[in-house]
């Protein structure tokens, strides 16, 4: 079992071990036995992998983006603190790949409960709340919603216009969740509760349109489930190049080129191999072409696969 290499200053009793010239690597296990995490391994980054907290290490999927790796490290460090202090801590809004990788790593931890929420079903950007199961008993109230109202009938604004206006007030991106466009009426924005009053008093214009902001309950969000269209294809394998080319109706050679350019993702992670196998529930996204989900998979009598592909419109 590995001892944690961080000690609160208050435990030094006024005589910092660093001041006495001792490095943490030299500290004996007996000195900080009370700060050990059972079966947790120290966190380290090795190329595209993140190993932490279990004897063999919890690993991010190969090829994970460096920013994703660093964000997962931050979430794990937060889990460490929550475990030691028996408190509940919350991340900022995280991107889908970070949420996916972080939850996969955090579920390996003993005595830690992780709750991800984005304010509404199918939310992409989510916050993760971390705490001991005895402390984190329900979904915390860590997300607020704001309605941005204005007359956009003759001057429509896109997602980027609303996001740019919000960031222009000084709010940083990770404090903002999803933005739900409401056509000519404006938009609804998910945001951290502590910034609601600020955005209500500060955001007065989006593009060339004057706006007003009002806090609304999450239950008042006007969210419509995404429209989809299903199709079925029969393929010799479940390779990503086979299913994606069938779902997006492009040649496999073109799809392979897009994989090489880093334009294809599965479950928010960039695909690096043409032959990566897919399964039911996997989400494929191709830059500039949209997304589709792998539905039911049935093996035929001839050993091929009849696959349902659900395309988001």
Image (tube, rainbow, N blue to C red):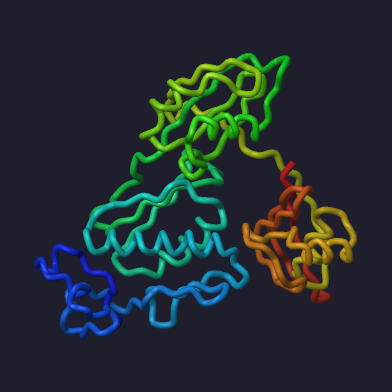
Looking at the picture, tell me which residue is in the foreground, 12 or 89. 12
Residue at x 63% of width, y 62% of height: 269
Indicate the quadrant containing the N terminus: top left, top right, bottom left or bottom right: bottom left
Residue at x 56% of width, y 46% of height: 124
Give left or right: position of 223 versus 53.
Answer: right
Residue at x 31% of width, y 64% of height: 80
In this picture, is 157 found above or below 239? above
In this picture, is 227 found above or below 106? above
State whether residue 177 appears in this view.
Answer: yes
State whether residue 234 appears in this view.
Answer: no
List the single residue furthest toward the left.
13
Residue at x 32% of width, y 79% of height: 39
Residue 234: quarter of image: bottom right
Looking at the picture, tell me which residue is in the foreground, 30 or 250. 30
| Residue 190 picture location, percent across and down | 49, 35
Give left or right: position of 136 versus 258.
Answer: left
In this picture, is 237 found above or below 288? below
Indicate the quadrant containing the C terminus: top left, top right, bottom left or bottom right: top right
Looking at the picture, tell me which residue is in the foreground, 189 or 73. 73
| Residue 268 picture location, percent across and down | 62, 57
Residue 108: quarter of image: bottom left
Looking at the picture, tell me which residue is in the foreground, 170 or 265. 170
């Amino acid at each position: 079992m590995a001892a944690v290499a961080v000690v609160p200053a208050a435990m030094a009793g006024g005589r910092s071990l660093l001041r006495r010239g001792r490095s943490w690597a030299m500290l004996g296990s007996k000195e900080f036995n009370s700060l050990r995490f059972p079966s947790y391994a120290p966190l380290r980054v090795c190329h595209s992998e993140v190993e932490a907290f279990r004897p063999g290490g919890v690993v991010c999927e190969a090829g994970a983006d460096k920013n994703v790796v660093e964000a997962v490290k931050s979430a794990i460090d937060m889990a460490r603190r929550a475990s030691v202090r028996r408190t509940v801590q919350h991340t900022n809004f995280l991107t889908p790949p970070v949420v996916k990788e972080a939850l996969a790593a955090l579920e390996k931890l003993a005595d830690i409960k992780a709750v991800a929420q984005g304010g509404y079903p199918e939310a992409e950007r989510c916050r993760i709340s971390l705490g001991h199961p005895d402390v984190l008993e329900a979904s915390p109230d860590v997300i607020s919603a704001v309605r941005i109202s204005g007359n956009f009938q003759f001057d429509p604004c896109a997602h980027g216009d609303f996001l740019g206006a919000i960031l222009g007030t000084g709010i940083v991106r990770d404090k903002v969740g999803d933005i739900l466009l409401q056509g000519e009426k404006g938009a609804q924005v998910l945001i951290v509760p502590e910034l609601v009053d600020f955005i209500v008093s500060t955001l007065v214009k989006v593009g060339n349109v004057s706006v007003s902001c009002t806090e609304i309950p999450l239950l008042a969000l006007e969210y419509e489930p995404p429209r989809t269209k299903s199709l079925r294809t029969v393929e010799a394998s479940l390779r990503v190049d086979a299913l994606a080319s069938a779902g997006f109706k492009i040649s496999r050679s073109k799809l392979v080129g897009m994989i090489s350019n880093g334009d294809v993702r599965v479950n928010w992670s960039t695909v690096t191999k043409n032959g990566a196998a897919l399964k039911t529930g996997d989400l494929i996204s191709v830059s500039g072409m949209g997304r589709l989900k792998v539905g039911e998979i049935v093996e035929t009598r001839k050993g091929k696969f009849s696959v349902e592909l659900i395309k988001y419109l």
